[in-house]
Amino acid sequence: MTACEVFREYLVRQLKANYLNFDLSEHPPLAKLVEEETRVWDRRFDQIEKRYKDFAGIKVTDWPSWEYVRHANELRNALTHNLGQYTSAYLRTKLAYRPTSEDLHGFSSPSSDDGLINRESIPLSSTMADTVIGQLIEVAREVRDAIQQR
């Protein structure tokens, strides 16, 4: 969860520093608009994605590596808002981890994803955590490189 928040904050700071770094002290209405816009970014990740396209001309959502971000974000949401249990949004990500019978302590896996939603906790291991964090670091570097090339 912390890795996702650090990643989100990194995206926001890069966007602000490179595309919204204006002295608007003499233009209070514009300053208010910028403040209101950026406040939304705390809870609307889709707005950050949209603003990269709008402000920077970078379509991060088209990158193959953005699947890592979608996965990490939906994993974070399931852990934070669904008591760690599977959600349909998490299972729709291409990288969603489905439990094995070993994860279910000898019980068999449900025959469909519907049997997991709101019933089974997403298994977490140090390997999975390391992988998700490493993938977010990789995408953060891609974002940095894309901004520097502009």
Image: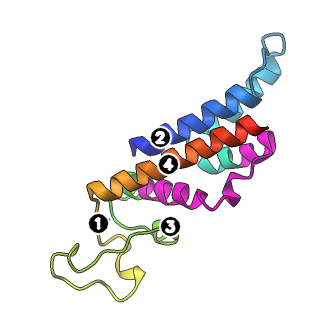
Q: Main secondary structure of the magenta part?
A: helix
Q: Residue at x 58, y 42 (%)?
A: 141
Q: State which mark lies toward you, 4 or 3.
A: 4
Dot 1 or dot 3: first in sequence order is 3
Q: Residue at x 39, y 46 (%)?
A: 1
Amino acid carrying label 1: it is Ser
Q: CA distance from mark 4 to mark 3?
A: 19 Å
Amino acid carrying label 4: it is Leu
Q: Position of residue 123 (x, y in %)?
A: 28, 65
Q: State which mark lies toward you, 2 or 3.
A: 2
Say the numbered circle drawn on residue 5: 2
The residue that disc 1 covers is 121
The residue that disc 3 covers is 89
Q: Which residues are magenta?
A: 50-77
Amino acid carrying label 3: it is Ala
Dot 1 or dot 4: first in sequence order is 1
Element class at badge 1:
loop
The residue that disc 4 covers is 136
Element class at badge 2:
helix
Q: Are marks 2 and 3 in contact (CB under 8 Å)?
A: no
Is residue 72 magenta-colored? yes
Q: Is residue 104 in sight in this rendering?
A: yes
Q: Residue at x 44, y 69 (%)?
A: 96
**For mark 1, does the 10 Å Cα neighbourhood hold few (<14), some (14 to 19), or many (20 or more) residues?**
some
